[in-house]
Amino acid sequence: MSCAPQNPMPQAAAYRRSPDEVMRLSRMGCAHPTRLSFLRQMLRRLRREGWRFDRPVWDFDARGVGRAVYRAIGPERIYSLVAFGHDLPDEMRSDRVIATAWDATFTLFDGTPTHHDLDRLAANVPLQEAGRISPRELSLSRANKSVRLFKHVVERLAQGQQPDAGALAETGYLMRTTAVYGSGKFGAADREVVAARPEMRAPFQAEMLSVWLTRAFTVDLVEHLARVRGGEAAVRLDPALKRGLGVGNSTGLGMAPFLVRHPVLLNNWMMAREEALARVRAQAGAAPGAIKGFCTALAEARRNAAEWHSAHPVQKDKLEDLRIGLDVAASYVERQWDSAGAHPWDALWRWVQTYLPVEAQEALLAAMIEPHGDLVDGLSACMDADEEASLPIDGTMCVAALRKLLASNYHWALAQAYDTPEGAARFWYVSEEKLEPRLGERATEDGAEKELPLDIGRQAAALDAALDGVNGDMPVARFLLAHPEHRHVLRRVQIAARHPFSEIRDNLIGAELLPIDMLRCKLAFFGATRFDPRSDRWVRISLFQGAPYPSDLAREAPQ
């Protein structure tokens, strides 16, 4: 790995799964969040370091229009979520990226905003892409109400009653974000501005903090509107019901290319998770506390699977696999697993791989890691990446060595038929209207001449073909002088030699591609749950369901 993690276990390498197994979209599209997920990392740090939270500004009217500031106060720095509420007509409410108005808009401010800052932000944040923010802002986001549930909760609380628990569990959130932008978009601070800060070193920490504070805002807003309507008769949301609410999110194709464009980062995410599983499997025995924690995690996974619903045919089949697989696993653990035997976790995992479908296998991976925080949490420090360090090409490498790397690490790419309609059925491009990645059908849609270079498999095959007949002793620097068009993929081949989990080992322009598999993999690392695809190109999920709120954090230690 690219760092020196805590509690190194050299013997774990023998238990690590191979990239050929792990880096296939059929498995990546079954990923589940683990304790290494970015939101879990954030909550552990905030609790460990004693961060405090307050809400110095709350200025909302009876329609829910106004602004608020939520502060996270750490040992060295303060971050503030600035939230704006809007009176959005129903006909303007849309989760699509082309929307121009939302129920609420947000930015994460670096420090405590002044009145001048709030006025500046009020003039820009509600406009989102059409506005401009400054390097003092770390993220830009917006959210829409889950209209029927939001109204139901307001009405019940205003009447002094609690909302229907079943309705809350079915939806799981009061509002859903439709975009959370960071890393320099629309004038916000570049990643390098905050990357050296300990609390921001892990990936997507600013975005996770923004969404977590947004979750508190959604509950505060619904309780505010209930008080306006019900006066003294109004009640607050029951803590148990409140805990079950997260923040929804609608995510489309714009997220998918990230995994291709950041190979070293992808490697480090996957490697950390695979190392965590390997460390658990490598243990000679199973401690009673770990067994109890695993059984609790397995029971929670079964409960989550029972409450998780989707109308998408692919996800419906996966959910059936998940429920059946988890039930079979629970029965096996209770009746047959020899937890006192030699290497019991490895024996359990071998059984899981043999008898359970992939969806259930990945859920069991998360459950097995869950009770082993002391063993695996140090791997969180390995999940960022210095990507610039991997950019230089080793021009002294000989062609023979390069071809050997292609044969060993890109055999999956060389076996594809890219000259068939099925092998090159799609092309990635950027939309002119929103500058967002899109996926076109090559046979029926225009624009293939503007194709993005995300066809890594086809590029690798083209490089291999270009090397055919070239003297094996030739340095690749000389080869690139004659064939500079292969520079991009040659660099990736050298990166993959050092970072074995850096490539998705599937044809990303093929007819069988399901982009939602790429989305789910990335979202699982965020910590997302309740994946609900609405097509093969966009999905709804929930974040922070079951997690503590800022007001709860000091009283408990997130796991």
Image (cartoon, rainbow, N blue to C red):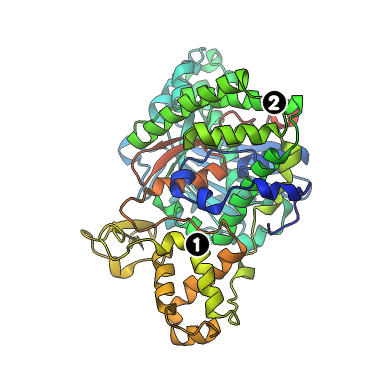
- Above or below for 297 versus 502: above
- Sequence-wise, the earlier of marks 2 and 1 is 1
For residue 350, which numbered disc appears in the image? none
- Above or below for 107 versus 67: below
Q: Which residue position holds label 1?
A: 261
Residue 235 in the image, given as x and y percentages of width and height? 56, 16
Does residue 132 show up? no
Q: Report the amino acid beneath label 2.
A: Ser
Which mark is in front, 2 or 1? 2
SS under mark 2: loop
Residue at screen point 56% across, 80% down = 398
SS under mark 1: helix
Residue at screen point 71% across, 51% down = 381
Residue at screen point 56% across, 19% down = 331
Q: Report the amino acid beneath label 1.
A: Arg
- Which residue is outermost to the front? 342
Q: Which residue position holds label 2?
A: 339
Q: How many marks?
A: 2
Does residue 536 show up? yes
Please rate how many residues cluster around mark 2, counting C-alpha atoms within 10 Å: few if below 14, some from 14 to 19, many from 20.
some
